Image: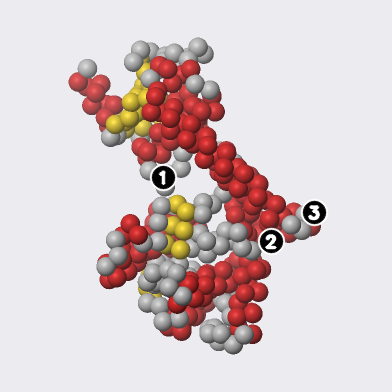
Amino acid sequence: MVSGGSDSTALAYIMADLHARGLVGPLACLHVNHKLRGRDAEDDQVFVAALAEALDIPFFCCEVDVALLARETGGNVEAIGRQERYIAAREALESLCMHAAVPIAEGRIITAHTQDDRVENFYMRSIKGTGPGGFRSMLYRNGPVVRPLLDVSRAGLRCYLEERAARGEVVVRDEQGALWREDATNAHTDRFRSYVRHEIVPAAKAQNPQLLDTLCRTMNLIADEDDFMESLAEDALVNNAEQAEGYTLLLPSFGMLALPLKRRAIRSVLESLIGSEGRIESTSIEAVLQAFDEDGSPQSGYVVNIQGDLAVSANKQGVLIEPMARFRTRRKRA
């Protein structure tokens, strides 16, 4: 995905170079125009189209009126924009794989997230709140999505672009002669990410000039421990739960597990029921925990609604988590 900013523009050159050396397969360049910035957004699209042409890469463009979608759904503009980008990316990936006769499972969506993005996410999650796994920040790979630049700074990528131009290699410039496009709204500190980027991160860098490297090392350590805890949670569900399509029964033995392990396992169950894109509320996890009494036994007769459409009920057999419709159907039959 290429927005035209410095990070994604650098990624396009890097991937094209790797392709020319036979190190990666067929490429395509996707640009999503969110229709948020008028003429500037149109100029971004022109720039990325020229970049793709210069690199001889097929160009996909998707125009989405994100502001309209936000008004219609009541959603957050940034969240909807992200969702629409990944929808477009998956559609472009399917098209490219089909055209290149490559199995879709071998296709990849490459994004240009950097060290800076990781650190910004760390602070954003610290301020808004997150579970332990949230502090690992972005994954290098998540399904088909690959983020190869997570250990590279934005400043480093801009140096790369300038050095590339100085060496006389293929580059594209916009009408003002710039090597990448600047999104003026990124400087608006009324937006949360921009506030973190322009206020919090610089203040932290003043205390530790090596902030990006330091925090990224910390996040990598957190990620290692998070992976280990996730494996323990998976084992806990295998040994202490019955999982089927559409529901999970936590057995009485589940109540005897350590609290941090139970929280992780419950989060995993809820993600499987509502999908990875859904937001798991901490109150939902606590509501499931409360279905077990202090000695870890299921509280017979306990019933609660969580996440808007899930039912949690307990009896001697364990604690059942299921869609509300399934719960109501069972109750009618009983």
Asked whether the beta carbons under mark 1 and mark 3 sit within 8 Å of each other, the answer is no
Question: For the residue carrying disc 3, how many other residues have a C-alpha within 10 Å: few (<14), some (14-19), or many (20+)?
Answer: few
Earlier sequence position, callout 1 versus callout 3: 3
Q: How far is mark 1 from mark 2, CA to CA?
A: 30 Å
Asked whether the beta carbons under mark 3 and mark 2 sit within 8 Å of each other, the answer is no
Relative to 215, residue 61 above or below: below
> Residue visible at 57% across and 39% down?
225
Direction from residue 227 to residue 242 in the image, left or right: left
Residue type at tag 2: His
Asked whether the beta carbons under mark 1 and mark 2 sit within 8 Å of each other, the answer is no
> Which is more toward the observer, 140 or 81?
140
Q: Which residue, given by chain and number where applicable, does mark 2 sit on?
A: 198
For the rendered model, the colour scheme is secondary structure
Direction from residue 139 to residue 333 in the image, left or right: left
Residue type at tag 1: Ser
Please state which of the two labelled residues, at mark 3 or mark 2, is closer to the viewer.
Answer: 3
Direction from residue 297 to residue 208 in the image, left or right: right
Q: Which mark is residue 207?
A: 3
Q: Which residue, given by chain and number where applicable, does mark 1 sit on?
A: 276
Residue type at tag 3: Gln
Relative to 28, residue 262 above or below: above
